[in-house]
Image (tube, helix red, strand yellow):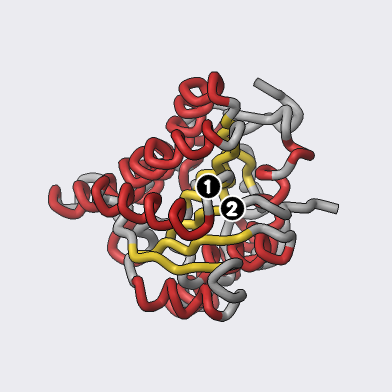
Amino acid sequence: MIDFTDKVAMITGGGAGIGLGIAQSLASAGAAVAIADIDGAGARAAAAGIGGPERAIGVACDVADPVAVANAVAEIRAVLGGIDFLVNNAGLHLGGYVRPVSELPVEDWRRLLDVNVLGVVHCAKACRETMRERGGGAIVNIASMAAYKGENAYGISKLAVRGLTVALARDFAEDGIRVCGVAPGFVASDTAMRLFPEERRERYVNEVQLVRRLGQVDDIAKAVRFLLSDDASFITAETTLILDEHDPFRWGIGAAPTPGVFR
């Protein structure tokens, strides 16, 4: 059984949806959790639903702003003593960002990359020192199956997250910090269920995913919990595709992740 007693996890975009599910899952395994969200009030409310201030706190944090990230990490360290795990879940998705690359206005591209790509960099850099001080740690970046298709702006941003997972794993290895990724298929989060009509959800399930059902938030939370745990202590630089799509090679973006290859 995975036991995160005495561990502290920071989850970005943790106020709702997949991020909140991950926070709840890690807390159930004994971790103290810090929910970092651009909606500070929502983060605090989500944390209050998990436990008291010694077990869960909420902090306001815009991951696109390195100063805001540094302040959030400082607050977490002051209250909970440090950070062992980071889950880079915050991101812009669905809606207007699922558009062909030539159609997305430049200002929207900048915002997308600031949040989805540079947000990962800001948070990882800000957490590195406290993880090193605590003897190492683990980071999980939330990518997407869209990263393997590369057919729209959102997918390109998540392809960059896959690349960052490898680069950060190499960069942080000397400090005993592992970096992995999870690339979910279609997950039945509140936002996805609201924005995608039933016929489109059915198409994903029947034509894109090998697992013929909608993903659940807990499917992703369980994968993240495993990758953060000592059970995955020999795994780094890998992105795990959850509810994988048919033959990623056909998209011409390189090989799919290979389970069991440790770097």
Inspect the image, locate mark 2, and give the three-letter code of the amino acid beneath it.
Answer: Val
> Of callouts 1 and 2, which one flags the residue occurring earlier in the amino acid sequence?
2
Q: Which of the pair 152/7 is nearer the observer?
A: 7
Instruction: Residue at 53%, 27% (x, y): give it.
Output: 169
In this picture, is 77 found above or below 204? Answer: above
Instruction: Residue at 43%, 32% (x, y): give it.
Output: 164
Q: Position of residue 184 (x, y in %)?
A: 58, 53
Left or right of 239? Residue 64 is left
Is disc 1 surrounded by few (<14), some (14 to 19) or many (20+) residues within 10 Å? many
Query: Which image quadrant for residue 202?
Result: bottom right
Give the number of the disc on residue 16. none
Is mark 1 in CB contact (under 8 Å) with mark 2? Answer: yes
Q: Position of residue 217 (x, y in %)?
A: 62, 66
Q: Which residue is mark 2?
A: 8
Q: Describe the element under mark 2 as helix, strand or loop.
A: strand
Q: Position of residue 37 (x, y in %)?
A: 39, 64
Left or right of 118? Residue 199 is right
Whether residue 210 appears in this view of the structure is no
Position of the C terminus by quadrant: top right
Q: Which of the pair 159/49 is nearer the observer?
A: 49
Calculate the distance from the C-alpha at mark 1 to the C-alpha at mark 2.
5 Å
Instruction: Residue at 63%, 38% (x, y): give it.
Output: 247
Instruction: Residue at 37%, 51% (x, y): give it.
Output: 74
Give the number of the disc on residue 83. 1
